[in-house]
Image (cartoon, grey):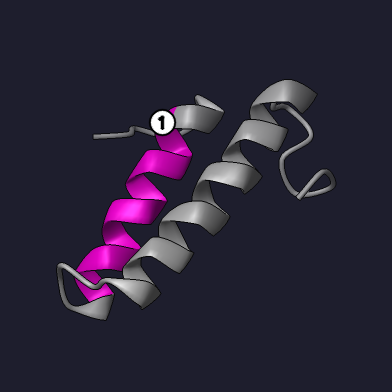
Amino acid sequence: MEEAWQQVDPERRRLLADTVVRMTISHIVAPSRNPAAAAEDIAAVAVCIAGVGGGF
């Protein structure tokens, strides 16, 4: 992650990694949407946290 997102502040990368892992586990344990939709949601949140791309 550090190599791929060098422009992202280290604290944001830590928050991003923690959030993505926790959201992924949550969707595995208690799915609320189909896997593709959940993956899109997680990716959108990741982009917002990282502050890159268009976000929502």
Q: Residue at x 23, y 34 (%)?
A: 56
Q: In this view, does 45 lie above or below 37?
A: above
* Quarter residue 24 falls in: bottom left
Span colored in magenta: 36-48
Tell me residue 19's x, y (percent): 52, 44
Q: Which residue is drawn at 28% across and 53% down?
A: 41
Q: Is the magenta stretch mostly helix, strand or loop?
A: helix
Furthest residue to the left? Answer: 33
Tell me residue 31's x, y (percent): 23, 73
Q: Nearer the viewer, residue 53 or 8?
A: 8
Tell me residue 48's x, y (percent): 41, 31
* 26 inside magenta stretch: no
Q: Mark 1 points at which residue?
A: 48
Q: Which residue is drawn at 27% across and 78% down?
A: 35
Q: In this view, does 5 lie above or below 50?
A: below
Disc 1: CA contacts within 10 A as few (<14), some (14-19) or many (>=20): some
